[in-house]
Image (spheres, grey):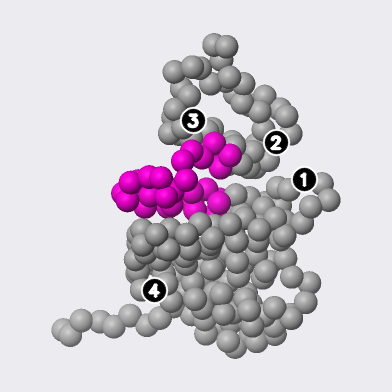
Amino acid sequence: MRHVPVLDTRRQLVGLITRKDVMPETIAARIQLSESEWEKVGDYARACSMVEATIRSEGADLAELTERSRVDQAKERIAQRLKLAEMYWRYRVVDEGKSPRTEALAVLDGALELLTRARADEVGSSGLRSEEGQIKFMQGVTRLIHNADREEDELIRSLLQEALALHTALDEHERIGEVLNSLGSLHQKGGRLREAEEVCRPAPTSLPPG
């Protein structure tokens, strides 16, 4: 066979791969490019299918790779699962009858398990803090958005505070802002408007002595 058809989860043809392109790294790169293009034009269902295909195309287990490769592979695989989870909780791209919340949390559990395995192998244990923060943030914000009552407020707050601590330690300002906005939304939904305002208020900037 000279060409391999690429189908999404709905059995739709979304591309062709030639024989020279069958290396796992090449397949992942091409699928990633396609996913980015679909997302730019707002076709989140097709973009979601691309991410799912990327995850299915993953090659060797992390334990079989060299240490440097394992760090890179762990980061890449976690990033793909974070992207897929966001497709579920933000854009609600799930099959009919399925819950965006349930699907997103299941993917995030898988990402956390992957991170835990990488650390158990003593691979990049100090280099996956940003990924851990993103997982915690999405676990919290998924519950924040897809939550009919306030029973999980304490769990959501705890997850967001963990994410905030991790991103603050790494000085990741954009991610810190995302977490603070979500904490503000949590307080607002709980009727704690003063706390919401305090969380979202920018910290005062100290001026150098002049």
Taking the spot 67% from the left edge, 69% from the top edge, the residue there is 143
Q: Which residues are magenta?
A: 54-83
Q: Is residue 49 left or right of residue 66?
A: right
Asked if labels 1 and 2 touch by Cβ distance under 8 angstroms, the answer is yes
Taking the spot 67% from the left edge, 70% from the top edge, the residue there is 144
Q: Secondary structure at mark 3?
A: helix
Mark 1: few/some/many CA within 10 Å (<14, 14-19, 20+): few
Marks 3 and 2, how far apart at CA = 17 Å
Foreground: 120 or 114?
120
> Based on the displayed image, in which of its 4 quarters is residue 56 positioned?
top right
Q: On residue 95, which mark appears? A: 1
Q: Secondary structure at mark 2?
A: loop
Q: Residue 207, image x and y in percent? A: 25, 82
For label 3, the residue is 27
The mark that comes first in sequence, 3 or 4, is 3
Where is 192 relative to 165, above or below? below
Q: Secondary structure at mark 4?
A: helix
Q: Is residue 79 left or right of residue 184?
A: left
